Image (tube, grey):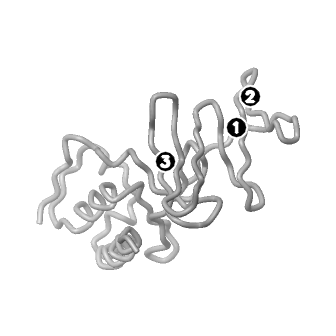
């Protein structure tokens, strides 16, 4: 099977995340004013833009961008900039829904079902073009010896998207 880089990368939005309130699957979508976090199970709906939502000790904290720095209005102090870590959604800082350990401790993750399909297509291919986004995939993901483990892990992740 041959992998060809798709012309459009439709998997950047929406992003599937873990709801900070109930632990179910939630979705972050871009809208006219920023981003909106919506849970599929509980009534959580949060807008983001000039705010950054982060988990601190299991609770959702809302930071506001004020005077060139992140401010926590709950304790009235400025905090350092939070950067998205691997396997986290960058606006709200929440863990991705589609993430698992694979190949001896590496974190395998995808933003959504389309991104999962992109990775499946790339990993499953025996002939690959070295252009576009696939050039920045981690080396462990490109190794043929990891192919079956990665594909099994991707299949497990896909099952978490099924309704029910």
Q: Position of residue 110 (x, y in %)?
A: 41, 59
Q: Position of residue 156 (x, y in %)?
A: 38, 77
SS label for mark 3: strand
Q: Are marks 2 and 1 in contact (CB under 8 Å)?
A: yes
- Give the residue at mark 3: 28
Residue at left 73%, top 61%? 58
Q: Is residue 37 left or right of residue 109?
A: right
Kind of element beneath mark 1 = loop
Q: Which residue is mark 1?
A: 81
Choose mark 3 or mark 1, whichever is in front. 3
Q: CA distance from mark 2 to mark 3?
A: 23 Å
Name, please, the residue furthest toward the left: 1
Classify 84 as above or below 16: above
Q: Label 2: few (<14), some or many (≥20) within 10 Å?
A: few
Q: Residue at x 80, y 38 (%)?
A: 72
Which of the 4 quarters of the picture holds residue 48? top right
Query: Which residue is the site of mark 2?
Result: 69
């Amino acid at each position: 099977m041959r992998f060809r880089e798709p012309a459009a990368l439709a998997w950047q939005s929406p992003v599937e995340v873990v709801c900070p309130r109930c632990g179910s699957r939630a979705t972050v979508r871009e809208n006219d004013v920023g981003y909106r976090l919506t849970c599929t199970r509980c009534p959580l709906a949060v807008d983001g833009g000039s705010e950054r939502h982060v988990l601190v000790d299991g609770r959702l904290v809302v930071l506001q961008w004020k005077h060139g720095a992140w401010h926590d209005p709950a304790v009235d102090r400025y905090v350092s900039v939070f950067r998205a870590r691997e396997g986290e959604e960058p606006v709200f800082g929440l863990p991705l829904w589609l993430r698992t350990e694979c190949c001896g401790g590496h974190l395998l993750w995808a933003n959504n079902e389309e991104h999962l399909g992109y990775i499946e297509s790339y990993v499953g291919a025996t002939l690959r073009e070295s252009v576009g986004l696939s050039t920045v995939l981690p080396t462990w993901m490109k190794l043929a010896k990891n192919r079956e483990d990665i594909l099994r892990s991707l299949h497990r992740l896909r099952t978490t998207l099924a309704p029910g």
